[in-house]
Amino acid sequence: MATLKLTDVRKSYGKVDVIKGVSLDIQDGEFVVFVGPSGCGKSTLLRMISGLEDITSGTLEIDGARVNDLPPKERGIAMVFQSYAIFPHMTVRENLAFGLTIARAPKAEKDAKVSEAARILQMEHLLDRRPSQLSGGQRQRVAIGRAIVRNPKVFLFDEPLSNLDAALRMDMRMEIGKLHSQLGATMIYVTHDQVEAMTLADKIVVLKEGRVMQVGSPMDLFHEPANRFVAGFLGAPSMNFLDVDVQARDAREARVANAALEPIAVAHKGRIDGAASALLGIRPQHVQAAEPGTGMLHGTVLLAERLGSETVVDLRLKDGSKFIAAFSEDMVLEPGMNLDLSFDPAQAHLFPMAAVSREVA
């Protein structure tokens, strides 16, 4: 397999900068997921790695060799697209073998590699069918199998599951995870679906407007977001943010409050030195219902969604701001009910307002 190194990689279309100086190290055998909102540059970055897009400036290295000017077929990379990109007039066997046929590989080698890919993907019984006879998940397996037979250094996946329904997405997500375990391959995967990112990745790269916001393991990013954008992007339902006044602080903690929140001390990790105001981030899953009159937050129920194992509640706090709580139990809550909430301040996050303003700008 392979290592990849991107050093200050940039992409511009005329005067429009799309990728704005990305530097990244990807280790041999890692499963790396690029995630971010639509238009953040994740697919463009993937296409630059594949060679389908030119690199305006910066350096891309694969196994220590600079490959900026190499054509796609010489980079040792295989790409799986969202649209499957398989030939409707060919059987599954012919689709899997297509790249080897073009390369004039010996028949014995071709047959062996096709059989091995079919075995790995459990599709031996589909080899003589045409794409029109396959489900969406089976077609995506064919696209992945065509990548496997090339024995690439790096697998690239560009939102491969977005055309599938929810049940198939979950099945194929598990298949791709098992495939990575079997092959031990270096894989880079682009998605806007944070569930795919959190469940598949060894390392997540969060992108916004062509810049890297944070790189780390899924749990590192979930529990220790570097900024308000990462905190709000990862997690479902999204993190709540409350405007708070910083009443006092020392080297480790700040005492904060607002019209809806009782004064509490929150660890700030040095982020709010000198700040007079901040955003307090609280994940919906970290909130518990409290006895009336004893909570840190006081709200009125707007909507309650009972999902069986979880109840997601939309509330309006007493200062007028909206808040979402996710309780890990089935609860009967009616609109208009008053609800007190508590949470562990150690699980909350503080972001200085000045930094948030720069981030938005």
Image (cartoon, grey):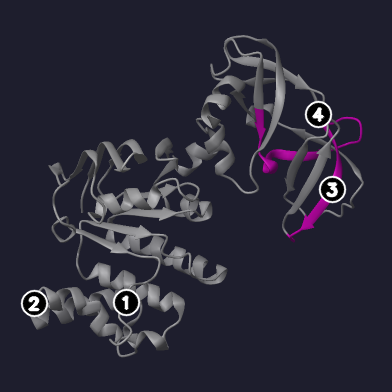
Judge whether 80 appears above or below 279 on screen. Answer: below
Q: Earlier in the sequence, mark 4 or mark 3?
A: 4
Q: Which residue is mark 4?
A: 296
Q: Which residue is mark 1?
A: 86
Instruction: Find out whether the residues at labels 1 and 2 contact each other: C-beta distance under 8 Å.
Output: no
Q: Amino acid at mark 4?
A: Met
Nearer the observer, disc 1 or disc 4? 1
Q: Position of residue 232 (x, y in %)?
A: 59, 39
Residue at disc 3, secondary structure: strand
Q: Earlier in the sequence, mark 1 or mark 4?
A: 1
Q: Which residue is mark 3?
A: 302
Judge whether 95 appears above or below 43 on screen. Answer: below
Residue at disc 4, secondary structure: loop
Q: CA distance from mark 4 to mark 3?
A: 19 Å
For mark 3, does the 10 Å Cα neighbourhood hold few (<14), some (14 to 19), or many (20 or more) residues? some
Instruction: Find out whether the residues at labels 4 and 3 contact each other: C-beta distance under 8 Å.
Output: no
Q: Earlier in the sequence, mark 1 or mark 2?
A: 1
Q: Which residue is mark 2?
A: 104
Q: Position of residue 37 (x, y in %)?
A: 50, 48
Instruction: Find out whether the residues at labels 2 and 3 contact each other: C-beta distance under 8 Å.
Output: no
